[in-house]
């Protein structure tokens, strides 16, 4: 199984964002992850479509995928704006979409890949009716809102059960992404459980080493190579 790394810019140095993006992309990051928070669904306020538009040329030039994780209430109202700004994949939360199938259809009608996200306490059963319609499922392994949190150990069993659900339905091509507390010490655990896309922020941007060195270290850990 090919594992992809998706650096989240949530904890990046925004005064050096272009430089840091260039470094992780040159180090082989396949995706760039943007956490959009509205201060309502989660207790933080972050980025809007203008940021997506601003970094799109950098990500596109590197041949990477730009994914936008909407941690917001009523995402349907802003999905067109993020699509127009140049995102490739839009992920919405099960918890904020009373008509989830319709929201997925909206994303795809705009030409984007569609993902759905589950908070730690949200059961996998809420996905059963839409698994065949999405390109990605994102399992939150921390309670969303802030970077730098510790991985919730119960997430591993949830990841494993979700991978089994996908395989039983012949949906092995659906990406299983994990976000929260991903570091060299947890990467292999989530990959062994069935994840193939790892979102990481603090472990890439907030250490004494360079972001490119941190990304390489994370990829090595995910592959199970301690050397």
Image (cartoon, helix red, strand yellow):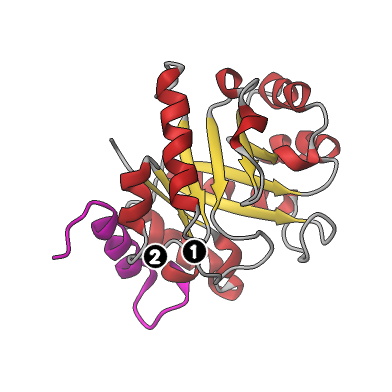
Determine whether the residue tagged by mark 1 lies in a helix, strand or loop: loop
Q: Is residue 159 visible?
A: yes
Give the Cα separation between the discs numbered 1 and 2.
Answer: 9 Å
- Work out whether residue 89 or residue 91 is closer to the camera in this orientation and state it: 91
Quadrant hosting residue 23: bottom left
Which mark lies nearer to you, 1 or 2?
1
- Left or right of 40 in this view: 10: left
- Left or right of 167 in this view: 151: right
Picture residue at 28% right of the left edge, 35% below the top: 1
Quadrant of image for the C terminus: bottom left
Label pair 1/2, CB-CB below 8 angstroms:
yes
Report the disc number at residue 171. Answer: none
User: Which residue, as the protein is rendered here, is positioned at the far bottom?
Assistant: 208
User: x, y (%) of residue 7?
Assistant: 47, 57
Picture residue at 73% right of the left edge, 62% below the top: 46
Q: How many marks?
A: 2
Crowding at mark 2 (Cα within 10 Å: few <14, some 14-19, many 20+)? many
The numbered mark, 1 or 2, whose residue comes first in the sequence reads: 1
Crowding at mark 1 (Cα within 10 Å: few <14, some 14-19, many 20+)? some
Q: Which residue is mark 1?
A: 151
- Work out whether residue 60 or residue 161 is closer to the camera in this orientation and state it: 161
Q: Which residues are magenta?
A: 204-227
User: x, y (%) of residue 152?
Assistant: 51, 61
User: Which residue, as the protein is rendered here, is positioned at the far left?
Assistant: 227
From this view, report whether residue 115 is shown above or below residue 104. Answer: below
Q: Which residue is mark 2?
A: 183
From this view, report whether residue 65 is shown above or below residue 200. Answer: above
User: x, y (%) of residue 9?
Assistant: 56, 61
- Report if residue 17 lies within the magenta region: no
Quadrant hosting residue 146: bottom right
């Amino acid at each position: 199984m090919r594992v992809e790394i998706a650096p989240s810019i949530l904890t990046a140095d925004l005064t050096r964002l272009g430089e840091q993006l260039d470094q992780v992309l040159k180090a082989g990051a396949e995706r760039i992850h943007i956490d959009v928070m509205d201060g309502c669904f989660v207790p933080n306020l972050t980025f809007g479509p203008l940021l997506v538009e601003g970094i799109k040329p950098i990500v596109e030039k590197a041949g990477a995928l730009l994914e936008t994780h909407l941690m917001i209430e009523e995402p349907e109202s802003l999905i067109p704006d993020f699509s127009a700004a140049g995102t490739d994949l839009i992920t919405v939360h099960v918890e904020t979409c009373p008509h989830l199938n319709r929201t997925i259809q909206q994303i795809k009608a705009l030409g984007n890949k569609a993902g759905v996200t589950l908070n730690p306490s949200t059961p996998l059963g809420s996905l059963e009716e839409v698994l065949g319609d999405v390109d990605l499922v994102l399992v939150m392994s921390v309670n969303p809102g802030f970077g730098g949190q510790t991985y919730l150990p119960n997430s591993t069993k949830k990841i494993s059960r979700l991978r089994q659900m996908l395989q039983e339905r012949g949906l092995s091509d659906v990406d299983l992404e994990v976000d929260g507390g991903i570091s060299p010490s947890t990467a292999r655990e989530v990959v062994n459980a069935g994840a193939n896309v790892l979102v990481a922020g603090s472990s890439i941007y907030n250490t004494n080493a360079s972001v490119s060195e941190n990304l390489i270290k994370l990829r090595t850990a995910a592959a199970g190579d301690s050397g």
